[in-house]
Image (spheres, grey):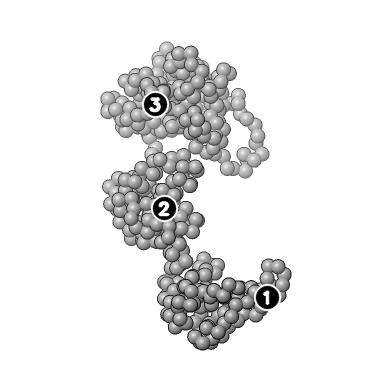
Amino acid sequence: MPRPRRDGARARAARRFNLTQRMVDRIRAEPLPFTVWDKRACGLCLRVYPSGRRVWYVVYRSRGRPEWFHLGDAALIPLADARRKRAHVAVMVLDGRDPVAERRAARVGTFAEVHERYVREHASRHNKSWKQADALVRRFLLPRWGRLSPSAITRADVRAMVSSIAAPITANATLAAASAIFTWAVSMEIASTNPCRGVEGNPTTSRSRVLSDDEIKKFWRAFDTAGLVRGAALRLILLLGQRPGETRRMRREHVNQDGWWTLPGAADATTGWPGTKNHSDHRVFLSPPARAIIDELSNGETTGFVFASERGRPVGGLDHAMRRICADIGAERATPHDLRRTFGTTVTGLGLGRQCMDRLLNHADHSIGSVYDRHAYRREDQAAWERVAGHIMSLVDDRVAGDNVVQFAPPA
């Protein structure tokens, strides 16, 4: 039984006929558009408009909804040709393809053009690390796929791309960047499928590097070789445990007189502050050693980046500095993020608990407990940062000691 119209009027019965060319030629327009279905060719219909225009369509289902594939004007396409075209569309649908989506994708242009739209309309607005992904796309994907239509890129092409990149982590990151583009393209109905789905990345192991007590002392002293600003930034990462990207972009406006550093969750394009990774506001207590590092770089300024380069931009090259320090002191490879991991492991090693570590590191808490526990933990967090700083300073300076300092050696 036909469904009622949206305005509540009774729906007209479907018009189904064993169409002939003579019947098609004799169909006349009515005040409202109507559809005539061909019984001999499933899905083929003639849409007749009040203007007298008549258009052939093939109707099929894709992803649970009907799709109308435009064949062309009935004045130019005879019934026999329309039936042949319908058979071609039916074969495409049986093969799992979506003709409407493929035609739409063909109008969009090449993969390079889709990538430009993705960056402009989505990535640059919603993804803080879009520049890194964009660099991978331009280096590894555009030379291979740039001139292809997105619908022409197959899963085999994706596997070939992944296997062509020697570095496993880089290959995985490039695969993720490609998948993000296709996922967006599917949501915008630019592409019908994401060929990256089902393609496995290279197996990797998560980093577990934590500095031992002896290494903390060696690295702390070696930070001087990285230069005043870079060395200070690396020391602050170890003392405070914040993300390297957020630490090197610390702004003086965010350092409060009461000893707290406020990290706004939202990005600020006017100042260059990137926002926190989880978009949540965060505050960090600056222990006396941390405050001393910041004060050493101050010339009375109240605005700008704390760890600024000569041009006033956030200092860079922290990864390179760590690689050089590791070579100089003969240590296993360590990164700035390993300093953050060392801080977190020190928090739990001092018996302060994993919940405390998560708060200090600004990890998102999705547990049900966070819904009911609205305590700010300001005093507890301040004491934790002070205790970690006291422990680290006792390792790097034999003259520093305290009753509350617990000697801790991270697990091997």
Q: Residue at x 60, y 77 (%)?
A: 29
Q: Residue at x 55, y 26 (%)?
A: 262
Q: Position of residue 252 (x, y in %)?
A: 50, 21
Q: Secondary structure at mark 2?
A: helix
- Please name the residue that numbered disc 1 is placed on: 11
Q: Residue at x 57, y 17 (%)?
A: 257
Query: Is residue 243 at least partly visible in the picture?
Result: yes
| Marks 1 and 3, the one that precedes in the sequence | 1
Q: Quadrant of residue 283?
A: top right
Of residue 260 and residue 204, the one placed in the foreground of this image is 260
Q: Position of residue 122 (x, y in %)?
A: 48, 47
Q: Are marks 1 and 2 in contact (CB under 8 Å)?
A: no
Q: Residues within 10 Å of mark 2 (few under 14, many from 20)?
A: many
Query: Is residue 213 at least partly visible in the picture?
Result: no
| Marks 1 and 2, the one that precedes in the sequence | 1
For marks 1 and 3, give the CA distance. 69 Å
- Please name the residue that numbered disc 3 is placed on: 315
Q: Which kind of residue does numbered mark 2 sit on?
A: Val
Query: Quick one: which residue is furthest to the right in this view?
Result: 8
For marks 1 and 2, give the CA distance. 41 Å
Q: Residues within 10 Å of mark 1 (few under 14, many from 20)?
A: few
Q: Position of residue 109 (x, y in %)?
A: 40, 57
Discs 2/3, front: 2
Q: Identify the image quadrant of the C terminus.
A: top left
Discs 1/3, front: 1
- Please name the residue that numbered disc 2 is placed on: 114
* 398 vs 134: above or below: above
